[in-house]
Image: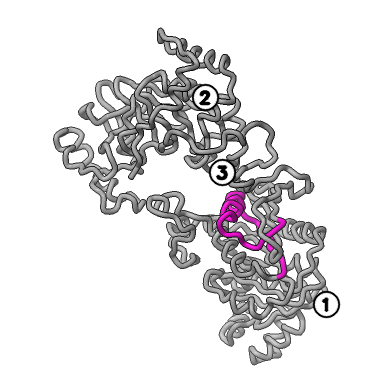
Amino acid sequence: MRVFEALISDLAISFLDRISKNVHDYLFANQKIEKICGCKDFFPSEDRFLSLKDELNKPEGFYMAEDRGEYGDFQTNMPLSKAVTQVLLKKNIVPDVVIEPTCGKGNFILAALQSFPSVKRVIGIEIYEPYVWQCKFNILDYFLSHPDANKPSIQIHRFNVFGFDFLELKKQIQDSNILIIGNPPWVTNSMLGALESDNLPQKSNFKKKRGLDAITGKGNFDIAEYIVVSLIRLFEKCNGWLSLLVKNSVIKNIVYEQHNNHFWISDIEEMNIDSKKEFDVSVEASLLFCQFGKHSSQQCQVTDFYSGSIINKFGWKESFFYSDINADGLFGNIDGKCQLEWRQGIKHDCSKVMELEQNGSGYRNKLNENVDLEEDLVYGLLKSSDLKTIVAVRPKKFTIVTQQRIGQNTDYIANYPCTYAYLRNHLDLFRNRKSTIYKGNPDFSIFGIGEYSFKPFKVAVSGLYKTFHFTLVLPDKKPVMLDDTCYFLGFDDLISAVAIHTLLNSDVVESFLQSITFSDAKRMITKDALMRIDLRRVLDIVNSETIVKQANTTIMSMGEKMEMVFDDFYSAVNQKNLQLELF
């Protein structure tokens, strides 16, 4: 049967039915229920107590539960909840107080009640009312079935986790051994904002990013990350532990920020779970575990949740962050700062209009419209999927390059009547772009554009694919552009481009990138990672004969009649960087 949209057992129904018939005051009803299951303020108001009586008299009908997956709400099943508490028992965790910050239906609370007889107090917070009732009903059913079980004081609060007064709670329990356990939402702040959810933290620059980073990708964050960091910040000096199911990216970010935060968390562990089996979602996730109050650790042990076997360790080593601290190879010798400035490709957020394919003498857009344009502003375009070869072939896609630098006035496009009319016909799509980077900028603005974009030769890599392959990009009558899923270096001459291209495809660089990147990241290759490749150090390590031979093989495959010598590599690496800064 369902009561308040929550499933309830026959045992609990029978008990509540007797209460509702024999007790007429909700405060007295709460007292009787608390004696049975320890749950305080079972009915938050008289209105809810009276509503229960009505609910119990309703016939059971068909009910379709709300799908809350889009809110990052993946309820933890009871077997997994129990397995988590068993893992904690093996670590000799003995909590006095259990806190579940987003308790949902309460499976973690039930698992804790069954696993930790030492618990004296349980606090659960949940914003979704049907889950609050489901949690309470499950707790009531458990103690009706196990009347001799340890009965701590239990409080289940219907409250937004971002507004709950954890500071006051800390004052009450700071002398206790605290266990924070659960499964916070697997969703980003921007996603919940798009869903118009009110279950969001107060708007702030949570990660303290500056400039473009604050209003583009780096300003976005996982809701679970916000919750975990907030809890760590509050409870770090207490006695206790934190054990939460989160995406691997959240754990990586927390360990990465430890270099600046120095939170008092130690024994940090990422225990990998099979999220497809447990939640039927294709997300890399783990149980994050750490201990409060001892010292500040900047490394994280990675293990398998089910077997406990050690996989690797990631984190900070001296002044550098590695995805595998114990990786073999010479990668440490090339970790530094790249002599050249890596750039990201063009960002326009209007692919229906801006991305084109040739159609006879004209073009076709993603709206299936045939388009006639002047050629002056049309350039070949390569995407991540095009960067699988040693040398990029002639591009199949094209794009309109509306600016040569960020912020450039676009009124000049009127000098190209066909292009201008085409863009104006789709002005509404440009003005409806959601990213705030376009606000206050000229119509048809793009980003990731500068003098570097128009270099004839480029060396590019995909940020999306889980490979470390670099592609040489040649001009197609004029420079070829890359989209914003790609990173590249630009060159004025072929010799320099081939030299750097060959160095970047060396085993030394591949080994290094494997040691600093995370295969489960949405974007495995980032500008930050690429800027750590010290090309001069690479040149010192590689075998000169091998590298020259590889370079000349690439040149021959292009049909060029030239030959490279090792001195060309020195010239390429030591040349003055002519790529302009973004700002």
Residue extending farthest to the right is 148
Task: Assign a secondary structure to mark 3.
Answer: loop
Residue extending farthest to the top is 561
Amino acid type, callout 3 = Ala
The answer for how far apart the CA atoms under marks 2 and 3 are is 25 Å
- The quarter of the displayed image where residue 111 is located: bottom right
Q: Which residue is mark 3?
A: 521
Task: Assign a secondary structure to mark 2.
Answer: helix
- The quarter of the displayed image where residue 449 is located: top left
**Quarter that holds the C terminus:** top left
Residue 210 visible here: yes
Residue pictured at 34% horizontal, 50% vertical: 437
Of marks 1 and 3, the one in the foreground: 3
Of residue 394 and residue 251, the one placed in the foreground of this image is: 251
Amino acid type, callout 1 = Pro
Question: Disc number at residue 257?
Answer: none
Q: Which residue is mark 2?
A: 503
| In magenta stretch: residue 257 | yes
Per the rendered image, the range of residues in magenta is 239-267
Amino acid type, callout 2 = Leu
Task: Locate residue 92, reporting x and y percent.
Answer: 82, 62
**Quarter that holds the N terminus:** bottom right
| In magenta stretch: residue 555 | no
Q: Which residue is mark 1?
A: 147
